[in-house]
Image (cartoon, rainbow, N blue to C red):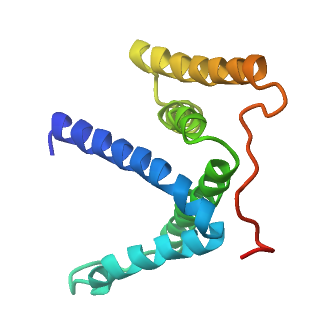
């Protein structure tokens, strides 16, 4: 896969995440967060069921790889979904989208810290703009909605579910 195709796939994935955030807003108003998370994982499990057949020439995974896969699933799927759904339930879709726009910046910073990747000037500028967008949203919320500060009560609680 060439660089352009890789960048196109990443752009598509971010567009899908953005649509997931926007579509989650009316869903968290109607359904509990953990039910939505389990629905997401159930649909994903059904869609990827055919991947369980291991090719005969594939080597077995070692213990370290199993641990990394578990951590990736826990952090990258489960906790991300729960935190994102609660965040969308407690804020506006626009506020959630602006905060979620910082995901690439967070990945860049973590890549720099853990993987020792050298950030480019463009990556530094993108990270600074993401931080600026979140700061601007926070300042705007404090100035125009001091009582709410961008946080709204969920429309449905566990007690009424």
Query: What count of labels does the image hold?
Result: 0
Q: Residue at x 58, y 55 (%)?
A: 80
Image quadrant in which the C terminus is located: bottom right
Q: Is residue 27 above or below residue 57?
A: above
Q: Nearer the viewer, residue 122 or 115?
A: 122
Asked whether 15 or 153 is in front, the reply is 153
Q: Residue at x 22, y 83 (%)?
A: 55
Q: Position of residue 82 (x, y in %)?
A: 63, 61
Instruction: Relative to 123, say whether 30 is above or below.
Output: below
- Side (left or right) of 145 relative to 97: right
Judged left or right of residue 157, residue 2 is left
Query: In this orientation, does residue 48 appear?
Result: no
The residue at the point 38 percent across, 42 percent down is: 14
Residue sitting nearer the eye, 115 or 22: 22
Q: Where does the image place residue 79, in percent across and percent down from the top left?
A: 63, 60
Residue 133 rendering spot, x and y as whole percentages = 57, 21
Q: Nearer the viewer, residue 74 or 91?
A: 91
20 sits to left or right of 89: left
Percent x, y of residue 98? 54, 32
Q: What residue lies at 21% left-to-right and 81% top-to-bottom?
A: 57
Q: Is residue 34 above or below residue 4?
A: below
Q: Quadrant of residue 137?
A: top right
Residue 128 visible in the snapshot: yes
């Amino acid at each position: 896969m060439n660089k352009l195709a890789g960048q196109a796939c990443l752009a598509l994935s971010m567009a899908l995440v953005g649509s997931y955030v926007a579509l989650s807003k009316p869903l968290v108003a109607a359904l509990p967060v953990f039910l939505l998370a389990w629905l997401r994982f159930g649909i994903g499990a059904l869609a990827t069921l055919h991947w369980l057949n291991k090719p005969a020439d594939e080597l077995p995974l070692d213990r370290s790889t199993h641990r990394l896969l578990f951590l990736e699933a826990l952090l990258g799927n489960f906790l991300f979904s729960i935190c994102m759904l609660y965040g969308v339930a407690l804020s506006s879709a626009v506020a959630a989208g602006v905060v979620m726009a910082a995901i690439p910046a967070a990945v860049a910073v973590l890549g720099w810290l853990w993987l020792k990747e050298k950030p480019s000037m463009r990556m530094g500028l993108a990270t600074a703009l993401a931080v600026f967008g979140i700061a601007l949203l926070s300042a705007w919320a404090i100035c125009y909605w001091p009582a709410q500060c961008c946080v709204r009560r969920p429309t449905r609680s566990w007690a009424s579910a």
